[in-house]
Amino acid sequence: MQANIRHQVSPYLVFFLIYNSQVGVGILSFQRTIAQKAGYDAWIGVLAAGCLVQAFIWVLYKLLGKANGDIIDVHTTIFGNGLGKFLSLFIMIYYWLASLSVLIGFIEIIQVWMFPTMPSWILSMIILLSVYYCVSGGFRAVVGMSFLSFIFPQILLIALFIFPLKIAHFSNLLPIMNHSFMDLIDSIKSSLYTIAGTEALLMYYPFIRDAKASKKFAHLGVLFTTLLYTISAIVSFTFFSEKQLKTTIWPELSLTKTITLSFLERFEYLYISMYLIIISSLIALFLWCSSRGLKIIFNRKQKHTLILLCLLSVIICHFDGSFKEMLNKYIIQMNLWVFYCYIPLLLLVLTFLKRSKQNDE
Amino acid sequence: MNLKNSDKGKGEGSNRRTDPIWLERLSQSNDFVHEHTSFREDEPFWISYYRTLISSDILHKDVLPYLQEQIPLAELKSRIPVQEIILSKDTNEIIQNILNGHMAIQKHQSDVECLLINIANSKFRDVGVPNMESSALGPQVGFIEELDTNINLVRKRLPVPELHVKEMKVGELSKTKVAVLYMDGIADPENINTVIQRIEDIQYDHIQDSSYIASMIEDNSNSLFPQSISTERVDRVAAGLTEGKIIIVADGSPNLVILPVTLMESFIAMEDYSYSWIISNFFRLLRLAAMFISTMISPLYVAIMTYHYELIPARLLETLVGSRAAVPFPPFLEALFLELMIEMVKEAGIRLPLKIGQSLGVVGGIVIGQAVVEAGLTSNVLLILVGLGSLASYTSPVYKFSNTIRFIKFPVIFLAQWFGLLGVFLAFQLTLIHLLRLTSLGRPYLSQYPIRNTSFQDLWLRLPFSMQKENPTTLRPQKKWKSTGKGKKMGPANDFYE
C-alpha cells in the first residue's frame, strides 16, 4: 500500500531520516558503555555494528520491497489480519518506548546540567508540545525537521571534534586489538543500541517516492552516522583515560568544556539547548511511526493516538524512578531480538510464501 | 450651452411621466445631476451624471457639442469622440457605470434605454519614487493608486502578448476592480486557477487595499509570516512575472501582491541585481544575520544573564555585570521594558506627521535612552543590544516581514525567561516547525526544504547572471530556462586572450 503521492518525499531525504533516527541522546554517553569491557578497542565495535546495520538496511529494503508497504502490510500478508495487527502492535509499542527512553534521557541531562529544580513534567510537556505540532503537520513536516536538525547543529557537532584534538593522546588507542573477541562482541552489542533507529524505516517506507532509488541514501546515512559515532568514540578515547571514562557519564558533554572562545565558554549549555532540536525531531519521527501504526491497527484518527501517546509519555516522565534503567534494559533486548532476529526471519518467511504462491500459479 | 434643471418640474401632479428605476434610485443624492439640454420639452436628450465623478472638461468639449441635433442614440454613439460608449437597457449595468463616472444620455426622460459615455474624472497622483521600498540603484518607479496606470507600468516592462490580465470585481459595497496578472506559458495553471478561484470566493463588503485580498486568500491566516509579498516596486513585479509568479492588483492600492513566495524572498532586494554578485551575496547574508540578531539578541541577553552567566568568559562578564550593577530589575523586566519603549518610539514615528516624526525620533532614541541608562533603570549593554536589534529588523526589503521580526522577539523573551537558552532554542524550533508547515498557494514556504538546485542560483545566494539559467522550480514554472544559452557560458571564454 503506497501513500498518496502528495504526501511522499524525495528519495534523498532518506539520508536525513536515517541520520535523525540514529542520533539521539546515545551519542552523548555511549563512549562509556561501549568501553566497559572492550576498553580503547571499542571503536572497532562501533564500526562492526555499523556494518551490521548496513546489512539490516538491506534486509529492510528487501522485506518492504517485497510487501510494497509498511510492516503492518508485511504482517497481515503473512499472518492474516488479526494476528498480523497484534504483532504490529508490539512494534508500535517499541517505537513509543524508544521515543520515551530518548525523552527521559534528555530530561535527565537537562536536569543534571542546566535546571536541577525544573520538574520533569514541564520539560516533557514543552518538548512534546512542539513534537505534537510537528507531527500534526504530517510526514512532510517530520522529514523537514529531520533535515533541519541535520543542517543546523552539524556545524557545532563537527567543531566539537576539532577542539579536543589539540590535547589528544592518540597513543591511547595503541595497541589495537588487545582485548578478547568476547569483549569486542560486548561493545558491538552496546553500540548496536546506540545506533539503533533505522527500524523506523519499517513505517515510513511507503512515504518515499521511488523507494528503490532511496536505498543508496539509506546506506549512505548509516555510513555517515557510523563514522560520526566512530570519530566521536575515538576523540573521547584519546581525550579521557580509561579510568576517567568509567566515571564520566556523558563524555561528549564533558568534552565540550574544552571549547573556549574570547566571548563564549562553557559550551555545554549551548550544546544541550541545541540538542533540543535533534531530540525533538527524533521523538517526532518515532511518535509519528507509532501513532500512524496505531491509527491503522485500531482504525482511529492519528490525532487521537498521538495525543494518547504524548499524554502517556508526560505521565511516565513525571513518575519515573527506577523506570529508566528498566526501560533501557528492555529496549536493548527488544531491539536486538525483534530487529536483528525476527525481521530477517520474517524476510525468509515472506520469500518462501511468495515463491510458493508463484509455484502454485 | 443652455441647461435647465429638471428638478423644478418634479413632484408636480401634472407631471405624469414614470422615470426608469435607475433614475429614481440615483437621484436620491444631491450630487446627482439630471438635466435637459434645451428649454423646449420636445427637444432631445436628457443627460444625467454624478457631478463629483465626472470631468466637466470632457463633458463640455467632447460631449455636449454633439447633442445639438436630433438624431438616434445609435448614431450619436458613433459621433461622440469618447472611447468608452455603451448603449444599454440593463438597469444594473446603467447604475454601475454611472457610479463609475459614466454619463447617461436619454432620448426621453422616461426611456430606460440610454447611452453611457465614460467621462470619469481620474485625478491621481503622478507615478513617483517608491516611498517604502527605496533603493540607491535601479528604477525609481513606484505604483500608484490607479489600477490602469499600474497595469500600464507592468505592460511597458513586459510588452508581450503572454502577459494576461484577468479582471474581477470584489467587495459587495466597494466593487473594487481587482486584476490578476500572470505570464501565460510560464506560470503554473494550477496556481492561476487557485488564485482566481479564491478571489472569486471572497465575500466581504469592502476592499480598501490589495493587502485585504492577500490576507483573505492566504493559506494560513493565523501565521505571523506574510505568505505573499506586497510591493510598490515595478521591477520586483515584472521580475516575479517572468519567473512564473502571479500578481494581484487592486484598484486604489499602490501595493501589488506577489504570490506564491518563499521565506528567503523577504531577504531579496531588487538592488541586489545591480551590484556584483559577490557583494550582493554578502548583503543577502547580512540581512539574514540581521534577522537572527534582531529576534535573538535580547532573548539571549535575558537567558544568559538570568541562568547561564557561566557562558560568558570572566573578562567580558565583568563589563556586563558592571553595567548592570545599579539596575534594580531582573534582566527580563529590563529587556521587556526597553524593547517596548523602542517599539513605542518606532510606532509613534510611523504615525506622526513627517516633520514632527523626525524630531521625535531624536528625542525618543537618544534623549530617553541616555536618560534611562543614567537613571540606572537599564544597563548600557542592553541599550546597545536593543538598539542594534531594532535597527537590524529594518534590513528586510519587505516591510511586512520586518514587522514580523519586530513582533516575534517578544514571545521569545518570555520563553527565555522561563527556560533560559533552552527556551530560546525552543522558540527557534517552534518557528522552524511552523515555517515547515506553512505554504504559500500550496507551495512550501520554507525554501530551505526541500532543497532545489535553483535555490542556489538565485534565492539563498545570487550567482552571476551567467549561472542563473533556470526559473525557480518551487513555482513549478512551465518555462524551464531563463537564459537561452542553456549549457554555454555567456561572454568571452577565458583563454588568457592569446
Image: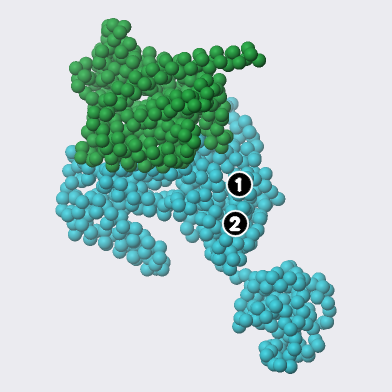
| Secondary structure found at label 2 | loop
User: Residue shown at 55%/47% (left/top)?
Assistant: B441
- Chain A representation colour: green
User: Residue shown at 27%/62% (left/top)?
Assistant: B367
In the picture, measured across the screen, residue A337 lies left or right of residue B18, that is: left
Location of the C terminus of chain A by quadrant is top right
Q: CA distance from mark 2 to mark 1?
A: 15 Å
Mark 1 closeness class: few <14, some 14–19, many ≥20 residues within 10 Å: many
The residue labelled by disc 1 is B191
- The quarter holding residue B18 reads bottom right
Letter of the chain shown cyan in the rendering: B
| Residue B258 appears in the rendering | yes
Location of the N terminus of chain A by quadrant is top right
Type of amino acid at the residue the image marks with label 1: Asn
Between residues B384 and A339, which one lies in front from this camera angle?
A339
Q: Position of residue B213 (x, y in %)?
A: 55, 57
Vertical side of B409 occupied by B210: above or below: below
Mark 2 closeness class: few <14, some 14–19, many ≥20 residues within 10 Å: few
Between residues B23 and A200, which one lies in front from this camera angle?
A200
- The quarter holding residue A227 reads top left
What's the chain of the residue with tag 2?
Answer: B
Q: Looking at the image, tell me whether mark 2 or mark 1 is earlier in sequence order.
A: 1
Count how many numbered circles sit on residues in the image.
2
In the picture, measured across the screen, residue B372 lies left or right of residue B174, that is: left
Residue A30's mark?
none
- The quarter holding residue B474 reads top right
Residue B201's mark?
2
User: Residue shown at 24%/40% (left/top)?
Assistant: A119
Q: Position of residue A324 (x, y in %)?
A: 27, 28
What's the chain of the residue with tag 1?
Answer: B
Q: Position of residue B52 (x, y in %)?
A: 61, 77
| Secondary structure found at label 1 | helix
